[in-house]
Amino acid sequence: MITIVIPTYWGRRMTDEDKPSDSVFDHPTPLDGSDTLTRCLSSLAKMHTDNFQVVVITATVCKEINQEVMEKVEEIISPFKRGFPVLQFAASDLEVVKSRLEFLDLNPDFFNLKSYPDIRNCQLLVPCILGTELIVAIDDDEVVPPDFLEKAGSFAGRTVNGTRIDGVAGFYYYKWGTYRVKEPPRARTSKNLFDRKSVLQNESYDLFMSKPGRLIETSITLGGNMVFSRELFYSVPFDPRIPRGEDIDYMINSRMLGFKWMMDKELRVDHFPPHTVSSRKLQEDVIRFVYEKRKVELSQSLPGIE
């Protein structure tokens, strides 16, 4: 069975003020706002195959709204249960799982609903419990084409041309009709590396797309379009210390442990991220890159690390 996992992020009502203790997500859906999850699930209902189940991972910015959000998400997913199996994993379910892990003398600290890597680890954990063979990760602000799952299941966990493929990454396409992200004014002429982030992204995407063939080696993964083989998600967790960019960090970790990632140029989703401006993104990017650089350096002295 293939499990499609969709994390969905929710915030306070639009009239409520954020609090310093709130979790920080790029674009959480306001409790009284229009959701993106319905559109995503509607696209799944149009897929050519029905050999899948869906797990919605519900995260909130604060525990005070957990119950309301859980009920809201249940209202959203309920009509779709007539078309395919879909369940919600929310804060109350997490408490049950963590209690069970503690009972088994296992560390529950890798699993939470407060940060991206912890949520992504729940994204791996729940399919493990369900006995899944393949995890397909998308996000709730995306729409998938009807043949998406057929393509998603084409390579991960299989040997292609003598190479075992453990993980597959796909592309985002945006409403302006391309996989390229929008570049702010003067991004191409700026001498500040972080100002040039979108330019560097686009140059990398263009390089991958210019290579021949459908399946190519990759140094990039996008969290809302990733496929994990059973051997991979049983072996490698997300690093809970990464503030953002947990998708590429996961690929780095798994490659160091000998797992193989490829980019499927035909595996695409349409991405409709709400507009957000966050002053913390740059700070978190700096922390992430410094941490990752040191992690890779230290890994070279460990046995069994490639």
Image (spheres, grey):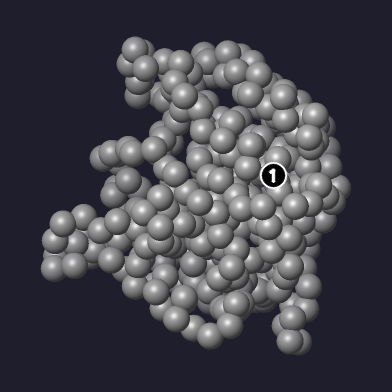
Looking at the rendered structure, the secondary structure element under dot 1 is: loop
Give the residue type that dot 1 points to. Lys
- Give x and y (percent) for residue 156: 72, 67
- Give x and y (percent) for residue 265: 55, 70
Q: From what the image shows, is residue 297 above or below residue 120?
A: below
- Give x and y (percent) for residue 16: 36, 13
Would you identify the image quadrant in which residue 185 lies?
A: bottom left
- Give x and y (percent) for residue 248: 50, 61
Is residue 230 something that shows in the picture?
A: yes
Would you identify the image quadrant in which residue 27 lies?
A: top left
Q: 197 or 250, which lies in front? A: 197
User: Which residue is denoted by mark 1 in the rendering?
Assistant: 46
What residue is rendered at 86% in x and 47% in y? 131
What residue is rendered at 53% in x and 45% in y? 142
Q: 238 or 1, which lies in front? A: 1
Is residue 102 something that shows in the picture?
A: no
